[in-house]
Image (tube, rainbow, N blue to C red):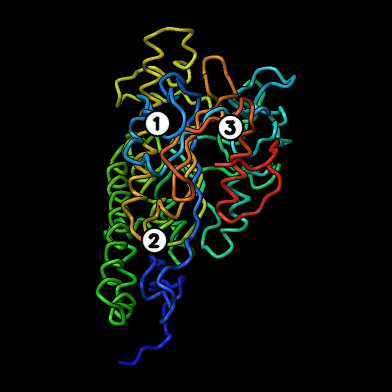
Amino acid sequence: MIITRKFLSRRATLRGIGASVALPFLDAMVPAFAAKKTPKIKRLGFVYAPNGIIMDRWTPAAEGADFEFTPTLEPLAPFADKLLVVSGLAQANGWPLGDGPGDHGRAGATFLTGVHPRKTEGANIRAGISADQIAAKVLGRTTRVGSLEIGLEPGALGGNCDSGYSCAYTNTISWRDATTPLPFEINPRTVFERIFGDDYNFDPHARRERIRQDRSLLDFIHDDLARMESNLGPSDRLKIQQYLDSVRDVELRIHNHEKQQSRLPAPQRPAGIPPSFEEHAGLMIDLQVLAFQGDLTRVVTFMISHEGSDRVYSSVGIAEGHHQLTHHHGDVDKIEKVARINRLHVETFARLLKKLRSTAEEDGNLLDHSIMLYGSSLSDGNTHLHNNLPLIVAGGAFQGGRHVRYANETPMTNLLLTVLDRAGIATDRLGDSTGALTL
């Protein structure tokens, strides 16, 4: 048997007229005679939960490896070996510092920047570059999409959203630079079309015709797929089929939601957005994983809701808005309801981790090759505290299974420096950082 050094590029795609689909990692992408273990591809995800946390339901009593999962963190127990609970960190620039009210605006703006935002509701907004965009400048050099900014609730970047602070501060955590906030996208169809690139026909008339005909993106790559599969082994053919099945499943779910909503006389949301929080979150999670799996992007920010959100979570039996409940003033019933919302948000993060862990690639799975940060820039939402923040780090870059507590008021930006460093991104300073952490 003759063995050649021909192999597939990591950037290989399946192409057809008006469509292209990037491939997941395949055995055929490893050159002949190459070492079996290939370099890990680093991916970063930042997941934001708004309005603070009921901290005594969140924080483990013990430190180190002997901690027990609290009621709010319990959904993350299956991933214990892959996560760290981090306590004691602060976003000092979230405090008023002479600017008066506006803690929700400052919370959103500081989470990944560590910079005190300029108090304005006009066009002269100013914060700082965020950790995800520092990462995107490096990790996004070779991917189709430099970074994805996605969310689950509508939000605008203009106007006054919190005591004289622009909506730009509450409605995103991602800043390309000090004056350029990046809006998040809530429509799964728009995200789907973005991650599958410019070769896909985005014309609205063509989209409506595809929906009418029930045509799939995958219909356009059939011939290229057949040619490629003829040169692949059984394992790679299975990997491609499983990946394309996942693409088609997400596409069908989006398509079905669009069809259902097209029958409504006056839809309240753009086409493609499911009516329930859980369905919407599930679609956005699947899109993130597809984007990671196909190496279409390596950086994602995911806002479960924006700061100051008064979303109603009826699926867990709550009729009041989230934000108003966080100002509970010690009311036991309201505290219990906020704790239920906190747990629902953690369950959403757990769904993302589960999907990453169940998606195999190279010498492990997507979670092994990722760093995922979950948290908020407020601890107690009732009194708007910006210290002892609720934070979780998950993935394959740290020794997991621990609750780590740092000295009070340690900058959270030190953790962000550490995350960037573990992803191979050298950064000396971010916001008010004083140096990377030892984890």
User: Comparing marks 1 and 3, which lies closer to the viewer?
Assistant: 1
Question: Image height check: is 79 above or below 345?
Answer: below
Give the residue type at disc 2. Ala
Question: Image height check: is 59 above or below 432?
Answer: above
Q: Secondary structure at mark 3?
A: helix
Local packing at callout 1 (Cα closer than 10 Å; few below 14, some 14-19, many 20+) is few
Q: Which residue corresponds to mark 2?
A: 206
Q: Secondary structure at mark 2?
A: helix
The residue lying at 41 percent from left, 74 percent from top is 29
Q: Is residue 105 left or right of residue 224?
A: right
The residue lying at 54 percent from left, 53 percent from top is 147
Q: Which residue corresponds to mark 3?
A: 108
Question: Image height check: is 19 above or below 146?
Answer: below
Give the residue type at disc 1. Asp
Local packing at callout 3 (Cα closer than 10 Å; few below 14, some 14-19, many 20+) is many
Q: Which residue corresponds to mark 1?
A: 66
Q: What x and y, as percent, mark residue 330? A: 46, 7
Of the image marks 1 and 3, the number of the one nearer the N terminus: 1
Q: Nearer the viewer, residue 214 or 294?
A: 294
Q: What x and y, as percent, mark residue 98? A: 75, 19
Q: What x and y, as percent, mark residue 259? A: 28, 47
The residue lying at 37 percent from left, 61 percent from top is 361
